Amino acid sequence: MATTFADVDEYIAALPEDVRPLLEGIRRSVRTVVPDVGETISYAMPTFLLDGQPLLHVAAWKKHIGVYPLPAMDDDLARDVEPFRGAKDTMRLPLDAVPYELFERVLAAMLQQRRAGVG
């Protein structure tokens, strides 16, 4: 049976002590790029909302933080994301060195596409 969480704070509190600051860093990055972001739990993971609709999901795993889904990317961003690609539309941020700047670039592309009505 999957664990359910009331909110993102509860999700983060349930993480191992060394992983909590990483997810808090992801959360700060999201709030930096999307100041009016909302939060909820969906599919048992933190979900960040834009205008009430899911923008992205994140989940802490044993060796990485998963980011779902990825936006369409220009060649430069796609090249930079490639080492962190999971499945087609996912990004795996390693727990030993989360690339916050790259994550923020991906999030900015996601936001731009959403604002343009794409995705």
Image (spheres, grey):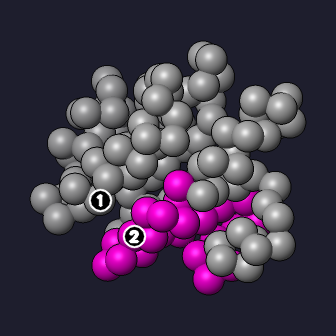
Q: Residue furthest top?
A: 52
Q: Quadrant of the rendered structure where residue 52 is? A: top right
> What is the magenta range?
82-104
SS of the residue at dot 1?
Answer: helix
**Can I make out residue 93 in this image?**
yes
Side of 1 where 53 appears, left or right:
right
**Residue toward you, 56 or 116:** 116
**Residue toward you, 22 or 75:** 75
Mark 1 or mark 2, earlier in chain: 1
- Residue at horizontal 69 percent and vertical 45 percent from the top: 110
In the rendering, at what x and y percent does residue 83 appear? 62, 83
**Residue toward you, 80 or 11:** 80
* Disc 1 residue type (three-letter): Leu
Residue density around tag 1, few if under 14, some if 14–19, many if 20 or more, within 10 Å: many
Magenta span includes 91: yes
**Can I make out residue 1 in this image?**
no
* Disc 2 residue type (three-letter): Val
Would you say the residues marked 1 and 2 are in contact, meaning their CB atoms lie under 8 Å apart? yes
Image quarter (top left, top right, bottom left or bottom right) of the C terminus = top right
Magenta span includes 115: no
The residue that disc 2 covers is 98
Distance in Å between CA atoms under marks 1 and 2: 7 Å
Side of 85 where 4 appears, left or right:
left
- Residue at horizontal 18 percent and vertical 42 percent from the top: 13
- Residue at horizontal 75 percent and vertical 33 percent from the top: 114
Side of 88 where 37 appears, left or right:
left
In the rendering, at what x and y percent does residue 118 appear? 86, 36
Q: Residue furthest left?
A: 17
The residue that disc 1 covers is 22
Q: Which mark is residue 42?
A: none
Image quarter (top left, top right, bottom left or bottom right) of the N terminus = top left
